[in-house]
Amino acid sequence: MKIIWSLVLLILSGLYGAPATKSYECTKIFEDRKNELLVELERIDEQRQSLDALKRATEELLRKKEAMVQGKDVKVDQKLNEIKTKEASIKKMLDENKKVLDEMKQLKADKVSQAFGKMKPAASAQILSQMDAADAAEIMMTLNSKVTGQILGKMDPKKGSQVTDALRKLPESPK
């Protein structure tokens, strides 16, 4: 009977002992897997934190660059406005200089015109005959038509025709 009891005990311990070992092995596998998952979770969390830090750094760098670009845009706009102001000033000075030059030319032409107007037609004709036809025509354009006619009448016919042709080609100038 001892043998039977030993056999029964052995069978029973085998039946009940086997599930305990299997349970222990499953728990160990689950614990190992749980530890692996925790390690993986920590690694993922570290990567997420690194990614967040990189994202913040990138956004900050982008903000700085945008501020720098806006600052440069403002400087460019200021320089452009300065250039436009200087350009307008130079244009104004150029117009004023042109006006003064025109006045000086007019005064010079008036003075030459007065000189030729006071001269006798024969003397004026002799001087103008020695000049280029275009220059003579410019001077004669400033004289009144009666004096111009008298001077042309005293000129050599060939030179007179050249001056007349040059007079015809000149635009009318206001007196």
Image: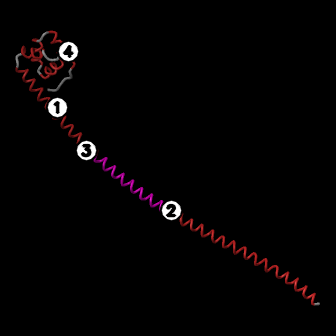
Between tags 1 and 2, which lies in front? 2
For mark 4, what is the residue? 165
Residue 80: which numbered mark, if any? none
The residues bearing labels 4 and 2 have C-alpha atoms spaced at a distance of 86 Å
Q: Is residue 146 left or right of residue 63?
A: left
Q: Nearer the viewer, residue 67 or 163?
A: 67
- Closer to the chain start, of discs 1 and 2, is 2
Q: Secondary structure at mark 1?
A: helix
**Which residue is identified by label 1?**
102
- The magenta segment: 53-82
| CA distance separating discs 4 and 1 | 25 Å
Residue 54's disc is 2
Query: Quarter of the image holding residue 150?
Result: top left
Q: Badge 1: few (under 14), some or many (20 or more) residues near its Cα, within 10 Å?
A: few
Specify which label sits upstream in the sequence, 3 or 2.
2
Label whose residue precedes the other's in the sequence (4 or 2): 2
Q: Which residue lies at the image location 20% right of the left edge and 21% below the top edge? A: 170
